[in-house]
Amino acid sequence: MILIQKIPGKINKNLIDIFKDIIIPPLCVVCGKIGPELICRQCISKIKEIGDKICKYCGRPLSRISPDDKGCNFCRNEDFNFYKHRSFTIYKGEIKRIIRKYKYNRIYDLKEVIAVFLKQTYIRNYEYEKIDYIDTVPGKHMELLCRSLSKLIKIPFADNILRVRKIIKQQGLDFMQRKTNIKEAFKVKNCLLSSGKNLLLVDDVWTTGSTLGEIAGVLKRAGADRIYLLTLARGL
């Protein structure tokens, strides 16, 4: 211990990390297998991207694509404020455990891996769209993730959404309860960052679209042009 304290800061930290890894070796956060990476390659290989057979509007996986452009049955009954939504994968299995470890266990180092997943979906669907800023639902885990994604896709993170009142957790609420819960819970900090802009709104999970739909409405009322949604995972 005395020897470590006498060594310069950076080397000191490296040695502490080495000793920490000897005592508690790095484990895959999904399966617990010992290895050098936060998520082992075997677990990553089990995560399958959503294919092309989807609703053109909300990105919902479909058994067959409708010949018209009216969207899936869910979209036809909703008045969303976004242009379209795309998600990386389905919320189950390995990705579900990754999100829970990141969000609830606060393993924030996972943000780099998750940002790569989001980048893949961004390139596949939005790379050639003119997007001025990215933004997200207020909260530390999503803000950290958006900053990582911002660096990868080279689009500024606006950090322009503010939660103005407390809301209860959406889990366990039905569709109408979710909409009521988050109604008028958000506002923009600076209308100039929204007015006439195309925005990419990012979140971890799409369930009913209530939260993202509410924020998209706030951004539209602040003058935003097109709003694109990007999520890591979605329910079926």
Image (cartoon, rainbow, N blue to C red):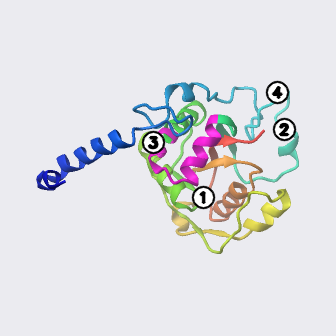
The answer to which image quadrant residue 152 occupies is top left
Asked whether residue 57 is in view, the answer is yes
Of the residues shown, which amino acid type is indicated by label 3?
Glu
Whichever of callouts 4 and 3 sits on the residue coming sooner in the sequence is 4
Asked if residue 204 lies in the magenta stretch, the reply is no
Query: Of callouts 3 and 1, which one flags the residue occurring earlier in the amino acid sequence?
Result: 3
What secondary structure characterizes most of the magenta part? helix
Residue 83 lies left or right of residue 117; in this view the side is right
Among numbered discs 1 and 4, the one appearing first in the sequence: 4
Viewer-closest of 203 and 73: 203
Q: Nearer the viewer, residue 84 or 192?
A: 84
Q: Amino acid at mark 1?
A: Val
* Front residue of 156 and 15: 15
| Residue occupying image coordinates x 54% and y 49% | 102
- Amino acid type, residue under disc 2 in the picture: Cys
Q: Is residue 227 in view?
A: no
Q: Which residues are magenta?
A: 94-114
Q: Nearer the viewer, residue 198 or 73?
A: 73
> Which residue, given by chain and number where applicable, does mark 4 sit on?
65
Which quadrant of the structure image shows residue 86?
top right
Dot label at residue 137: 1
Please report the residue visible at 62 percent of the width from the left and 35 percent of the height from the top: 94
